[in-house]
Image: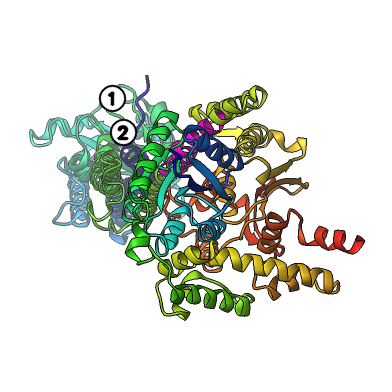
Amino acid sequence: MLRRRTVRASIFLSVSLLLVCVLLAFSLAVYDYASTIARERFSNALSSLSQSVLANLDARVAEMDRVSLTLIYSQLFQSLYAHHLAFPGSPQSDAMRITKIENTESLIELTETILGPNQSAPQVNIFDRRGEMIGAGYFSQLIERNVTRESWYSRVTQADGARVILPPHIDPLLEQTSVIVKGKRYVSLLRTFHDALLNTEGVVEVEQYCDTLFSELDMLSRSPASIFVLDHEGQQIYPYDGTPIDISELRHIAEKTLSDPAGAIVLPGNKDPLVFAAAVSRDTAWTLLIGEPSAGLASSVLQYAARIALLALTAIVCSLAASYFIARRVTVPLKALHAEIQTLDLENLDNTTDGIGASELGEIDELRGAFRDMRLKLNDSIQEVVSLREHEKAAQLVALQSQLNPHFLHNMLQTIAIMAEENSPAEIQELILNLAGVLRYVSSTGETTATLGTEIGYVNSYLSAMRARFACGFEYTIDIPDAMNSIVVPRLILQPFIENCFKYVTCTRPPWRIELRGASTPERWTIEILDNGPGFDGSALTDMLAKLAARRDGSEPIPLSISGMGVLNSYERLRLAFGKKVVFEITNRPEGGARILLGAMYNG
Amino acid sequence: MAERRLTFIVAEDEERMRDFLVRKTMEIDRNFDCVGMAADGEDAVEQVERHLPDLLITDIKMPVLGGLDLIAQIRRTNPDMRIVIVSGYSEFEFAQRAMELGVDDYLLKPIDVEKFRQILLRTRIRLEASAGMVEAEFGLDSIDAAKTEFAKTVLLYLQENYQQPFSLEHLASAFGCKAAYLLRLYRKVMGSTPTQDLIHLRIERAKRLLTGHPALEIKQVSAAVGYDDPLYFSRLFKRETGLTPSTFRDSMSRQ
């Protein structure tokens, strides 16, 4: 069986649910927005990092380029180199050999001068096409070395004066010179240079340590490798230590990253997804790729999310508390009202003074006000019903007692005794039957109502018995349409009026006459009770009419009494039976005697 | 020895009961003679004053004048009259008031005949024991010329004033004596009561008016002879003459 939820619980639940939903939706939206912002910031930071790293790299390459160009375009170099070429490969004379050596020394000095005190590059090599090479820097001498046999020769020649950068490599020549440079890797910048007639005279190579060139990248790079540089041909530039990388994958990443700067890309083999930023140098056509573990991004987003979650949680707790108090504020007065209803019984129905004060909630107060009004009205109507019942009983008792008056019975028995003496058995029989009818009707006290037919039958028995007693001094007529016989009226309602007739009529000399006339129209039914007695005394009639008028206006019920107030008692009973539909008139007949009209409207 | 005859009047509004009481009284004690019957209190007062009966048997509830008021009124002129109440009312207030008015007995309806017999016997014994006591008290044992003259003066007064509203007490005060005394003196001398003679005078006068003045209405005749209530006059006329005033006029005019 489902337990019905209390108002309090349902207010609390619905308000809470609503608040939680709103807060969750809001939090999600904020999270989404914040994570996008974080992602953007992250990729922007990464992108600007890659730009600056690349610019730095470009500057270093440009430095190498500067060395190369400064050398080949200096007048001194050109003249010294022309001298150099003028010497044959192997001079015959010592003087020539010495001159050649001096010339070579001059070239080396010039080159080292250009390299400057800071040693812009550790090594510069000048190749001629005869098979000689002049080294300057760590390795400073002239050796036999045929340039045409170098793997890069054709590429450099094709470039025709434009620079060619060789990816990192080991220089076996330098390897032998010093332990200091042992194991080092180099990046070389090569270009051909020409004479005045634009004939290719030789190739100049500027070598730079990889660890110098990529010092910044080394600083940033961490394991696993997350910085990559590729040249325009897709050759690996960085990392330079020969760490194997998936070139095609990197190219793919580079393409994607360049078209969409944000977005996590998982590098295969790495468990932690990396977010990449790429930049392409305009100078070197190198592509720089910097990858940051997405953990960094995730953590920053998480930080946001945690803050938002905390905020949302606080808000939810606050709102739950608020809804609890709202529910409480509504339900406390409701509970008080409930308690008030619980303790309600007949005893304290009219007691509305105790209990709780105003709840500050208009509707609840109105409800309680209405409840209290209802309570008072209920009390009033219960009391009214009770008093009506009492009244009804009393009225019936009055009617009964007047009928069971021993005086009436004594007189009847006396009449029967006299008749017996007069030897009139038929009369005795008739009187006894009438009397029995009267007694039976009066003594069957179970019913409180009767049909008008029965009631008239009873009145007829009563009047017939009275006629037997008063003989020719009294006569009566009853004229009630048969259609009225089924109307339901309070029992013994006519009795007090008939008795009243006798009471007054017998104060005058006979003959006495009582008439009952019934009339029924579509609107109402009435019975007129007429006598030829003295009529109502003027002041008594005024008094009675005043009491009836007061009763009609709804004031106090007419006090019931056994003696003398039969007419008002009966009026009271009619009122109890027919309410406002009752028809009732008391008048004196112009020809003398009293007239009472009673009845009721059929409708309204 | 010839027993003394006793007179009684029955006042009762129920005709059947009235007849019963008259019949039963005479049946139980043959010394009682019924001299009058009244259907209401006013009628009863007149009957009593007219016949001065030894016994009044009366109901309590009667038209016009109730039994107790009737008793109170006739007690003023008849202190020695025996009175028996016959009533269905056994209430204490009635019984007490009856005692105060000097009612001898109280008989409840329905009537126990044996009890009635005892009451009548007791009444007769009392009446016989007190016979002549009141007359002796008023000094009416012997009649002298002065007393005779006085009675005749009263008759003369009645003849002059019959058309005036009449009451025994009023008459007595006109002569400066007690009503009870005047009543007894008059009866001793004249053999009838002033009321009886007054009614006789009035009826005779009415007869003359009815026959001699056909234009007069009954109501006017009634007023002319001192009866304000023409109905009462009619009933009285009928009882005295056996005819109602109108039938009397008709029968006289036919002759």
Establish if A500 lies above or below A453.
Answer: below
Number of numbered discs on residues: 2
Which stretch did the figure color magenta? A389-416
Q: Main secondary structure of the magenta part?
A: helix
Q: Between residue A446 and residue A329, name the one nearer to us.
A: A446
Q: Residue at x 62, y 33 (%)?
A: A458
Can residue A25 be seen in the rendering of this structure? no
Q: What residue does disc 2 label?
A: A274
Residue A270: give its label. 1
Q: Residue at x 67, y 69 (%)?
A: B202
Whole-percent x and y of residue B105?
Answer: 36, 43
Residue B150: give its label. none
Whole-percent x and y of residue B169?
Answer: 46, 72
Q: Residue at x 29, y 41 (%)?
A: A344
Within 10 Å of disc 1 (Cα), the crowding (few <14, some 14-19, many 20+) is: few
Establish if A365 lies above or below A4.
Answer: below
The answer to whether B53 appears left or right of A186 in the picture is right
Whole-percent x and y of residue A516?
Answer: 70, 45
> Residue A394 occupies which quadrant of the picture?
top left
Q: Between residue A51 and residue A573, name the one nearer to us.
A: A573
Q: Secondary structure at mark 1?
A: loop
Within 10 Å of disc 2 (Cα), the crowding (few <14, some 14-19, many 20+) is: many
Whole-percent x and y of residue A557?
Answer: 45, 54
The quarter of the rendered structure image containing the N terminus of chain B is top left
Query: Type of residue at label 2?
Result: Leu
Give the CA distance from mark 1 to mark 2: 8 Å
